[in-house]
Image (cartoon, rainbow, N blue to C red):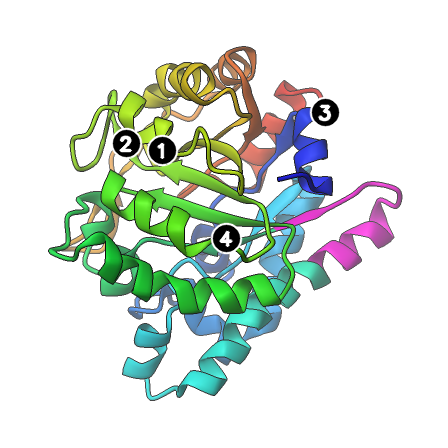
Amino acid sequence: MTSDFADALAAGPLVLDGGLSNRLEAAGHDLGDALWSARLLADDPEAIVRAHLAYFEAGADVVITSSYQATFEGFARRGIGAERAAELLALSVESAREAARRARVGRPGRRRWVAASAGPYGAMLADGSEYRGRYGLDVAELERFHRPRLEVLAAARPDVLALETVPDTDEAVALLRAVRGLGVPVWLSYTVDGDRTRAGQPLEEAFALAADAEEVVAVGVNCCVPGDVSDAVRTAARVTGKPVVAYPNSGERWDAKSRAWRGRSSFATELVRDWRDRGARLIGGCCRVGPEAVRDVAGAVGR
């Protein structure tokens, strides 16, 4: 699929933002709710705009919306009806657009891009199952879950849809079917463990699903440890021939039971340069990677 965003990727690399949730928590917001950062779409959307703006100001070319954990089902559990839920999903895109407008005031002449996040089914469950996959649903059921939300996000006209933190190939197939005909380019990004998806499928098999998908303008990995990225980038580039996206977490481990991060960060600038050299054209960070790290990424890729 040709698009301005695809053209920018070809001329890249582009710098992605970092973790939205950690930026919001640093500003004093409690994200312990099952909606996670999506709760603030209803409660304090200006906080989301400010968080996106911090990443643009740190050098990001692309920010990812707060819709990762925003679903009709999740909103319904909070008593939010379908019509209002659709408005909040669209607001996630508009909030990022507003941040881009404000960033242009400070640094005119530079294009800023908005990626609308669509997290996996497990994100809606809010129990850590997006790091396991295999939810007991078949591909058709997963496609029916994803399609309505993707339709709303696409109608809000983001530059690209981010199909992210995908743990297994069944969900990848469902997502690739669900985006057909929406008219918006997408990237497909797996969460991985070593050379396999979180559900245990070889990455060659997983990436190959996107090789002939017209809608997919980039494929890669996110929300994995930084040390797993380099080989995945090389594999994705070789198998698909498409630009590669890479945005791991800090290297700390998420403890779903206590809802806390454990361990130490291993996100390092020298790794970023290696990802770039192996073919990554869209590089940033995920959970626990903040604006200072994104500023370092921008420097490492020459933005």
Q: CA distance from mark 1 to mark 4?
A: 33 Å
Helix, strand or loop at mark 1: loop
Q: Which residue position is annotated with label 2?
A: 192
Helix, strand or loop at mark 4: helix
Q: Which quadrant of the rendered structure holds the C terminus?
A: top right
Q: Which mark is residue 291?
A: none
Q: Where are the magenta residues, as a range?
A: 99-114
Q: Which residue position is annotated with label 4?
A: 23
Which is in the foreground here, disc 1 or disc 2? 1
Say which residue appears at 24% left-offset and 44% top-offset.
170
Kind of residue at disc 3: Ala
Which is in the foreground here, disc 2 or disc 4? 2
Q: Is residue 272 above or below residue 71?
A: above
User: Which numbered disc, 1 or 2, marks the residue that appears first in the sequence?
Assistant: 2
Which is in the foreground here, disc 1 or disc 4? 1
Query: Residue 228 appears at what percent x and percent y?
Result: 32, 21
Q: Which mark is residue 11?
A: 3
